[in-house]
Image (cartoon, rainbow, N blue to C red):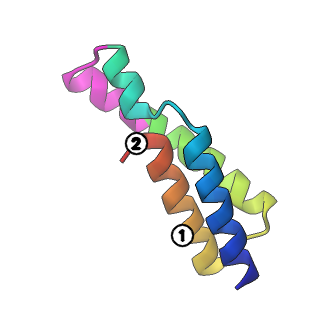
Amino acid sequence: MKTILIAAAFALVSSSAMAESCKFEAGAKKLAGAAQTSFLKKCEKDAKATCDAQAADKKLAGAAKASFTKKCVRDAVGG
């Protein structure tokens, strides 16, 4: 229960601190079509790696890790 509360608190802080998402950056760069798709895939892959590392630092496991990682990636990508 404690890890879920910590993950939820971090998610609130990270979503408010993250001003630019991948989709926002793609729009700012005026990417479209294949270039946009490629950019978003790379961004999502990078975000997943970062989020997995953050989950490991927080010693999350199981459902708490999966939930944290899913929300973290979604926030980073802008979905």
Which residue is at a point 59% across and 64% down the rendered structure image?
68
Q: Is residue 65 above or below residue 51?
A: below
Q: Is residue 61 above or below residue 36?
A: below
For label 2, the crowd category at 10 Å Cα-Cα, with few meaning under 14, some 14 to 19 and many 20 or more, is: some
Total of numbered circles in the picture?
2
Which residue is at a point 44% across and 51% down the rendered structure image?
74
Residue 49 located left or right of residue 30: right
Which secondary structure is most common in the magenta stretch? helix
What secondary structure is found at the residue carrying circle 2? loop
Identify the disc placed on residue 31. Answer: none
Residue 24, image x, y percentages: 38, 28
Residue 8 located left or right of residue 29: right
For label 1, the crowd category at 10 Å Cα-Cα, with few meaning under 14, some 14 to 19 and many 20 or more, is: some
**Closest to the observer, 38 or 25:** 25
Residue pointed to by mark 2: 78
Q: Amino acid at mark 1?
A: Ser
CA gap, disc 1 to disc 2?
A: 16 Å
Q: Residue furthest top?
A: 29
Identify the mark nearer the N-term, 1 or 2: 1
* Quadrant (top left/top right/bottom left/bottom right) for the N terminus: bottom right
Q: What residue span does the magenta drawing correspond to?
A: 30-41
What secondary structure is found at the residue carrying circle 1? helix
**Closest to the observer, 55 or 79:** 79
Residue 15, image x, y percentages: 55, 47
Which residue is at a point 36% across and 48% down the rendered structure image?
79
Residue 38, image x, y percentages: 34, 29
Q: Residue furthest left?
A: 33
Residue 61 located left or right of residue 76: right
Residue 49, image x, y percentages: 61, 47
Residue pointed to by mark 1: 67
Task: Report which quarter residue 3 is drawn in.
Answer: bottom right
Q: Mark 1 and mark 2 in contact? Answer it, CB < 8 Å.
A: no
